[in-house]
């Protein structure tokens, strides 16, 4: 698809104006009505310019990725690229977190009065705690849970309970776990893009995934860990629907279902991952035959928690009531329903806004693109693109065989992530703090950057945004 760079700049400029409007209008609302419960709307943050021990490392990582990332992404062997992407995401996330110093940036993030580590001692008897979990969700209940514990199914808290049980106690280890796990999300997205679109697009997306502004909140936020589990759920499902044999498809679908069940017990809102899963199913080759295995895997975690005494549906309805008991019942829907999208711009960057503009125009802009997708592109990569060495460095014929529809397949995957995010937005259960809550959805918008020309310029814009956010603001998560 041919698209003027001016249209990319227009999309990025519109996104920047959305952020500016959210800041100016939000600050006015907070000064006059005090209903946003955010010091620096639309983010949960406060103004506080600062530097820290992570500053030199963060700037160095940014310069290296901008300077060498696009070239290395093309030249490295595929497995080496996945390892390099994870290592880079780790370095980027750690360095950004350490701009705030070890104590504030990592060690205490998960130990505040809102967080999971506050209740570790109350899970001494795990079955009893699960059976009694719903009795402590509402604010009026005895010993009610802290906001994040009450706001998530118990698998979220159990993660940190189990870390404590194996000796990895305290906020430092919890933060390290979230960063290490969260950084793998970019690898899962790359695997998915390669299987459902093509390797060339995955390689072009790799630097943007590793250097995402979202790393500001992936660092030591439990939602970064949730994003990784969700991303691997989708990636394993992509392996299932493109598997070459029924046996492989079945194993992968069961594994994806198992991860999806876990995802739903980490966060109620991540049931919307099914929207992205539907896009994967549409783009895959093996469809119906994967569904029974997917359903079987998805039943495992719910059955275990139900037998332990936790009722997911009851807890969700109590959470909705708890949500309206607190700030969620006061925060104005009319502001957050669009200001949340400004948060998304800040966590995915202006490059993603430009890429989404290309993705959104893909089916209509490319002549017969969607028709071609239905005829042969839906079934994934051709036999040539499955061969080792195919893709950007493979035979020219292989690239031509898959290039006609690869961009469109990527666009449909990205738009699936955008649809899930929009449903979460319209639900009214995501008013504020979406810079962390929507990390599992935002990861699926970033591959749209693969559609952009001049990657170094756009990568520089992504890096500058992240560095400014982390140096000018004291983020709450």
Image (cartoon, helix red, strand yellow):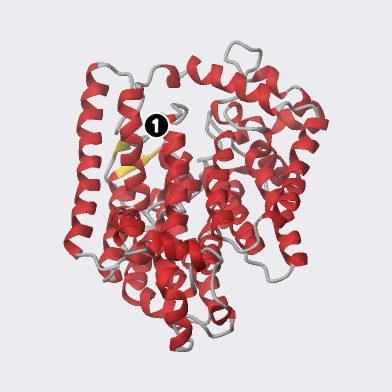
Residue 398's x, y, as percent?
A: 48, 83
Residue 270's x, y, as percent?
A: 56, 40
Rendered position, 427 above or below 8 = above
Quadrant in which the C terminus appears: top left
Residue drawn at point x = 60 percent, y = 32 percent: 152
Quadrant in which the N terminus appears: bottom left
The tally of labels here is 1
- Left or right, 138 with reference to 447: right
Rendered position, 238 above or below 75 = above
Residue 258's x, y, as percent?
A: 72, 49
- Left or right, 285 with reference to 135: left
* Crowd class of label 1 (few under 14; some 14 to 19; many from 20; radius 10 Å): many
- Left or right, 103 with reference to 178: left
Residue 294 visible:
yes
Rendered position, 60 above or below 394 = above
Residue occupied by mark 1: 432
Q: Secondary structure at mark 1?
A: loop
């Amino acid at each position: 698809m041919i698209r003027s760079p001016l249209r990319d700049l227009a999309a990025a400029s519109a996104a920047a104006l959305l952020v500016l409007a959210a800041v100016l209008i939000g600050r006015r609302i907070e000064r006059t009505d005090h209903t946003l419960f955010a010091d620096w709307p639309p983010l949960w943050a406060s103004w506080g310019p600062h530097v820290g021990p992570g500053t030199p490392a963060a700037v160095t990582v940014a310069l290296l990725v901008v300077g060498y990332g696009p070239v290395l992404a093309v030249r490295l062997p595929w497995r080496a690229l996945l390892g390099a992407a994870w290592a880079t995401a780790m370095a980027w996330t750690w360095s950004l977190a350490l701009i705030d110093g070890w104590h504030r940036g990592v060690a205490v993030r998960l130990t505040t009065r809102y967080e999971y580590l506050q209740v570790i001692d109350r899970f001494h008897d795990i079955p009893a705690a699960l059976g009694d979990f719903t009795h402590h969700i509402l604010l009026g209940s005895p010993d009610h849970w802290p906001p994040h514990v009450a706001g998530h199914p118990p698998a979220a808290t159990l993660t940190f309970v189990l870390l404590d049980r194996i000796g990895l106690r305290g906020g430092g280890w919890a933060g390290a776990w979230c960063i290490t796990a969260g950084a793998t999300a970019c690898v899962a997205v790359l695997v998915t893009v390669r299987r459902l679109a093509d390797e060339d697009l995955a390689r072009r997306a790799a630097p943007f995934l590793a250097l995402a502004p979202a790393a500001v909140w992936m660092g030591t936020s439990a939602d970064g860990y949730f994003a990784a589990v969700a991303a691997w759920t989708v990636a394993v499902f992509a392996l299932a629907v493109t598997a070459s044999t029924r046996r492989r498809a079945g194993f992968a679908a069961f594994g994806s279902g198992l991860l999806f069940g876990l995802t739903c017990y980490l966060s109620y809102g991540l049931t919307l991952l099914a929207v992205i899963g539907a896009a994967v199913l549409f783009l895959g080759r093996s469809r119906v035959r994967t569904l029974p295995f997917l359903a079987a895997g998805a039943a495992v975690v719910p059955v275990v928690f139900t037998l332990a005494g936790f009722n997911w549906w009851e807890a969700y309805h109590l959470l909705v009531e708890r949500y309206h008991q607190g700030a969620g019942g006061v925060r104005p829907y009319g502001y957050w329903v669009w200001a949340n999208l400004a948060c998304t711009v800040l966590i995915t960057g202006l490059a993603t806004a430009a890429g989404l503009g290309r993705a959104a125009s893909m089916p209509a802009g490319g002549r017969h693109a969607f028709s071609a997708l239905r005829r042969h592109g839906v079934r994934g990569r051709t036999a040539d693109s499955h061969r080792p060495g195919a893709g950007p460095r493979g035979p020219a014929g292989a690239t031509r065989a898959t290039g006609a529809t690869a961009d469109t397949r990527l666009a449909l995957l990205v738009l699936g992530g955008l649809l899930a995010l929009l449903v979460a937005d319209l639900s009214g259960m995501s008013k504020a703090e979406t810079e962390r809550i929507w990390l599992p959805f935002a990861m699926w918008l970033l591959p749209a950057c693969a559609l952009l020309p001049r990657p170094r310029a756009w990568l520089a814009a992504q890096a500058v945004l992240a560095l400014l956010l982390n140096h000018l603001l004291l983020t709450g998560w």
